[in-house]
Image (tube, rainbow, N blue to C red):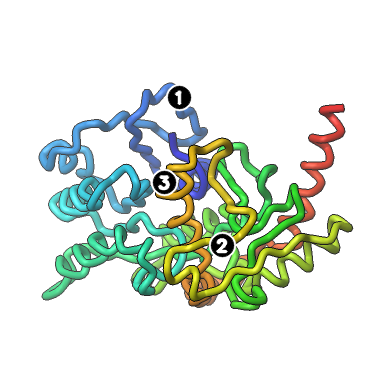
Amino acid sequence: MILGVGRAIVEELGAQGKHEVILWSRRDPSELKIPGVNTLQVTDYSHENLVNLLKGTHTVLAFFNPMSDPGSQNQIALIDAAVAANVTRFAPSEWAGKVRSGIKMYDMKLPVLDHLENLNKDKTVIEWGLFQPGLLMDYLAHPCPPSKHFDTFPLLFDLENARACLVEDGSAPLVFTSSADVAKVVARAIDYPGTWTVDGGIVGQRTSYKEVVQTAEKITGQKFTIYTLRPEDLERGDFISPWVPAYAPNLSAETMRDVVVPFISGWALGIYRGVADVSPVWNERFPDLHYETVEEMLRGAWARFQAQKKAEH
């Protein structure tokens, strides 16, 4: 099932109707009915099959979960098939911050970038570029994101329970961009006459977690509880806080220790080091596009949350 930013992009491309959009999924196509989009079930990742499927394709956008693609083998197979099928453009499965940032949790993504760079070492065999929106703003709206197809969790910030984890004072700059705005940029980029570049920052709003909390307090009228994290603890992979944000409720102690803590401490350290402080590369290419602000996202989320609570009583 395609969720999150991938779903937003596919929906936007389908709604615009300017291009033939084919969505590959491992699941039954009947589960993915998106207007303007043809869904194709693909489970055979052999080179020959992928090349045949890609013939006549201009642009490939990849949305792989790195946890379910060890060593990025499937994504690399897709790249090789795209080259063999003479695909013009390829966007690897990034959709976040700066990948070559020294953050351990991003190491799993490096084989794809290395492969693309090696392929184009002597001459350009496929044009490729990144779309880097920093952190997706939709996470700030948990548990009431704008789209039911965006699976959120409280990423260091919990609007519902008025709490946040900040590294030091939370003033490290970072970029938030809504998935809807990322989709608008990508849809425009499909027809961009220039060359896609490895540096592909998209800036919805450059802010800090400290400012996000201040904005949320203004909107909700609640004082947030702040848990302060130390960079030196995060460097060791320790997340020392009474509240440890998790991507699902009721996880086992082993999962929290072995999966959640390395993940959330990696993100916290990455944000502190500037992994999500991207440059407005695509903004400058499309200066007429307007972007949702953090305040607008939070106001919408708070209104939905209040309406949900009212409906439950």
In the image, residue 117 lies at what x, y percent? 21, 70
Label placed on residue 31: 1
Label 3 to label 1: alpha-carbon separation: 22 Å
Q: CA distance from mark 2 to mark 3?
A: 49 Å
Residue 82 horizontal/vertical position (percent): 20, 51
| Crowd tier of the residue under label 1, counting other residues whose Cα lies within 10 Å: few below 14, some 14–19, many 20 or above | few
Instruction: Give the number of the mark in front: 2 or 3.
Output: 2
Front residue of 59/81: it is 81
Chain-order first, disc 1 or disc 2: 1
Question: Looking at the picture, which amino acid does disc 3 mark?
Answer: His
**What residue is at 78 percent from the left and 42 percent from the top?**
305
Vertical arrangement, residue 291 with respect to residue 81, above or below = below
- Disc 1 marks a residue whose amino acid type is Glu
**Residue 19: which disc?**
3
Q: Amino acid at mark 2?
A: Ile
Q: Nearer the viewer, mark 1 or mark 2?
A: 2
Residue 129 place in picture, x, y as percent: 34, 66
Say which element carries label 3.
loop
The C terminus, quarter of image: top right
Q: Is residue 273 left or right of residue 227?
A: left
Find disc 2 in the rendering and name its residue.
240
Q: Residue at x 85, y 57 (%)?
A: 222
Camera-side residue: 188 or 158? 158
What residue is at 34 percent from the left and 58 percent from the top? Answer: 91
- Residue at horizontal 19 percent and vertical 38 percent from the top: 45
